[in-house]
Image (cartoon, rainbow, N blue to C red):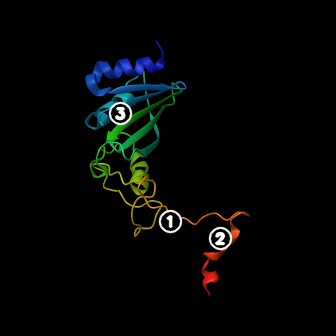
Amino acid sequence: MTRNDLVVDKLRAALGAAVEEISDFRDERTIFVPKNKLIETCRLLRDDPALRYNFLSDIVADDYLPDFPRFVVSYHLLSMPNKHRLRLRVWVDDPDDGPPTLADVWPIATWLEMEVYDLMGVRFAGNGSLRRLFLPEDWQGHPLRKDYPLGYEEVQFSFNWQEIDAKKPYAKQ
């Protein structure tokens, strides 16, 4: 039995329907769990002596606009004693009704959740510290969402320099 199979077997034995979907890619296992089973799943992964996922290395979110559910939050876990990685994913329909905070399981989650909130706008229930982490407090929107306006300046190359130069503020004087 591989480590990946052990994880799934333990989750199914303890939590039943907590495993919604399993995906394997390049020897990395991803397990989809429902929001309401996330904390219970993480505690089992952390506390089970055979698993010991003792490190939450990252939390990220993906925007699947125009699909529904729109967002998915991914938790990257590491079992340092077993030298094994695992990804948990949770679908999020409404960013204001995001998954529960994992700060009670891994304290670093508070900061990682702030990053996801700042850049994607997904709120984590129970995290009283959600605030801007990278962007100024008065920033409007969440720049990693697919519907965020780009507001960029076209890059100047040798073939389009005259076009770009004509749009510069000094060209209007």
Task: Name the residue carrying label 3.
Answer: 42
Place residue 105 in its image quadrant: top left
Q: Give the mark nearest the N terminus, 1 or 3.
A: 3
Residue identifier under label 1: 151
Give the Cα separation between the discs numbered 1 and 2: 18 Å
How many residues crowd around disc 1 within 10 Å: few (fewer than 14), some, or many (20 or more)?
few
Tag in front: 1 or 3: 1
Crowdedness of circle 2 by 10 Å Cα count: few (<14), some, many (20+)?
few
Q: CA distance from mark 1 to mark 3?
A: 39 Å
Q: Amino acid at mark 3?
A: Cys
The reply to whether the C-beta atoms of the residues labelled 1 and 3 are less than 8 Å apart is no
Nearer-N-terminus badge (2/3): 3
Q: What residue is drawn where x is 40% and y is 33%?
A: 88
**Position above or below: 54 against 141:** above
The secondary structure type at the circle numbered 3 is: helix
**What amino acid does circle 2 point to?**
Glu
Question: Residue 106, which numbered label?
Answer: none
Label 2 or label 3, whichever lies nearer to me, is 2
Q: Position of residue 150 (x, y in %)?
A: 49, 61
Q: Nearer the viewer, residue 89 or 125?
A: 89
Residue linked to disc 2: 163
For the point 45% across and 67% down, the residue is 136
Q: Which sits earlier in the primary sequence, circle 1 or circle 2?
A: 1
Could you tell me which quadrant the C terminus lies in?
bottom right
Q: Residue at x 37, y 60 (%)?
A: 131
Q: What's the residue at 64%, 76% (across, down)?
A: 166
Figure check: 7 above or below 93: above
Q: Quadrant of residue 171?
A: bottom right
